[in-house]
Image (cartoon, rainbow, N blue to C red):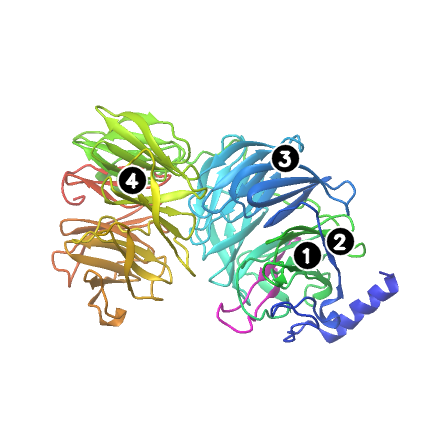
Amino acid sequence: MSIIRWAAVVALVFILGASYDFSLGNEKGDGFALSHDPEKYGIFLPARKVEGSMPTSDVVLHGDFLFAVGYNNITIYDVSEPTQPKELSRLYGIGEGRQIAVYKDHLYATARTGGMYVVDISNPELPRLVAHYDTMELATGICCVDDVAYISQRQFGTEFVDISNPSDPLHLGFVVSGEAQSVDCLNGILYAGDWGMSELSVMDVRNPKNPCIVGSAKLDGLGDGVYVRDSICYAATGPKRLKDVPAVGHGLDIFCVANPKAPELLGRIKFPPQVIHTVPDFWSVSVDEEKMAYVADTYNGVFCVDVSDPQKPVSVAHSVLPVFEKTGNPDPVGAVEPGVGVLYVAGYQNGVYVVEASDVARPLSSRRKGPKLEEPVRQSVVLSEKVRNDFFVLPTRGQALAAAWWKENLIWVAAGTDGLWLVEVGDNVPIVRKIYPTHGFVYDVCVHENRLYVAEGIKGVGIYRVWGDGERKIGGRWESGQPVRQIALPVPNRFLVTKEGNSRLNFLDISEPTTPRLCFFDQIRGGILYGRDLVSGVSPSGRLVCVAQKNGLLWYDFSGETPERKVVSFPGEVSFADGACWMGDRLLYFRRNSVYLCEEGEARALDEVPRVQIPHLAGFGKATACGNVVCFTNRRLGKILFFDFSNENAPQLLREYSLPGHPELAIWVGNRVVIPCGHAGLLIGKTPCEYPR
């Protein structure tokens, strides 16, 4: 493109401004534009797919090498000839690859339910997986600064991980904001694009053990990608509301963050509304030294925005990826990375693309600084005196995630990266009897008599025969390729239920443990299974309940030869923040600051079910019961609450605890409570009664 024409386009766009474009472009796929108005969004730049590339969610350029991540793989390209990427190598086994960051000689990849993978890329022709880290929740965004990886995990905030030894990542701490989707860090200040809250959150993380939120600002759409350069934060936004038609809100918000406590909106540019909102639903931005912003906006494509005047941003060029034959729509953009005269674009459905942009694209330069750690900071869990007085604490190097009573005073503990533990819970300090290596992270455990079931993440479920003092022998294994994070045993030694990935329940016939067989599955539509969604225990008639976001309370029956979904309670009303537990023949359904007293197979509308308000109850929690006592755990806020439900119409708060961990479902060994608490370890009540005194 000539310099004269370039200047003319920029001048015309500047005069017209960057207002909404409610047209869908001159050419159309199945409702999505194949190009946008050049007077508003700059010249159109065609995209060419890199042959042999696979569906990709993120791309990062590092020297002469381009790194691309997609489902279960990382691909490395030689881009010494920028317009002609040549595949050098491909590494499989990365799970649901989402974002990547390259730091020193290693690549760090988030993988949602799969946590974080660390890959040695010192030899790009032979990448090598050196570590797999178990994150607190769905690992989504990532940036790496001065030996710390900041991993955003949506509702559970952002986790800080010490990567000074890449082969041995260690948890430092975390900070909770609205719904951290992506993050960036500069000079010890962390910036998060909060999705559902439509906010930019600003956090001081100079002391990883004591981070705090210092500022925030509203965004003009759902938040995601953020990028900070020279005291300015650029935030990519999606639609304002998911159900709007067309989906209005896509764009770029620009803030001055010279004072992190008070971000100041400088300017904003809006991209064309999409005909509808659909997945993938993430957006990203980066900015080069010459103040050109590169914004990825899924079906809208890529926008190159001149932000040299942040109060008047101007889109000078754009690209929409070619139509993907299987959908009839443009390939949605997962990310964009500028190179020397080219843009490398992650096509979420079809692969990596090259967009020649000689007048626009320049590689990003380093501008990241952080709170240099003189020594690796190890998170020493600091528990309150109240917690230490009432509980024994067994520290774990990984996360304590679940526990199951076996016999007498012995329990099995799912300890994440620490594997499987056998713990004796006696009158004195609990004792770890044995630690067993496993094939994957241990997320959950169930046991019945001499048969042990262990959820081992991407390695599925291990079925073991156990006897004596903890002798163990493998009996069978179930693997589907999706990570298993929760299991339930509604009919001992007959049916096992596995929660796999984000949205699928598999029902296995385990009557022959050496060859478990899939006999039924339920794909959850429109929502995410986001934690301990399978309710502990079963109803009096043997039904299992799943608290399924946007779908309702799902009741599964096991009385026949094949399990089946029988009833759905409160369709469209249930949130992933809700929880439930059995108390006798009642299902207590916890929602916001209330408990609903449900009958088995509840058929009434939610507003017809008896409801009791509980002022102390915070949302986002799960529960289990022992007699009339309910232990309610809030993983997001690190809260444990005990309630007396002797009078179900007026439950009484008995005890409340706060801790720097993520408490999971409690179990009782006799009358002694046991609570796995993530990085805070395993808590065991000192007093053998229905609740800590």
Side of 152 where 547 appears, left or right: left
- The local crowd at label 3, few if under 14, some if 14 to 19, many if 20 or more residues have their Cα within 10 Å, is some
Residue underneath mark 4: 510
**Foreground residue among 109 and 3:** 109
Instruction: Work out how far the residue at label 3 is from the one at label 1, CA to CA, in angstroms.
Output: 24 Å
C-alpha gap between disc 3 and disc 4: 47 Å
Q: Which mark is residue 104?
A: 3
- Are the residues flagged by discs 2 and 3 in contact, CB closer than 8 Å? no
Under mark 4, the amino acid is: Ile
Three-letter code for the amino acid on which mark 2 is drawn: Ala
Badge 3 vs badge 1, beta-carbon distance below 8 Å: no
Q: Closer to the N terminus: mark 4 or mark 2?
A: 2
Q: Name the spot of residue 438 as percent of width and height, x first.
A: 38, 30
Bounds of the magenta segment: 229-256
Judged from the image, the secondary structure of the residue bearing numbered disc 1 is strand
Q: Quadrant of residue 393?
A: top left
Q: Residues within 10 Å of mark 2 (few under 14, many from 20)?
A: many
Q: CA distance from mark 2 to mark 3?
A: 24 Å
Q: Which residue is mark 2?
A: 361
Q: Position of residue 89 (x, y in %)?
A: 65, 36
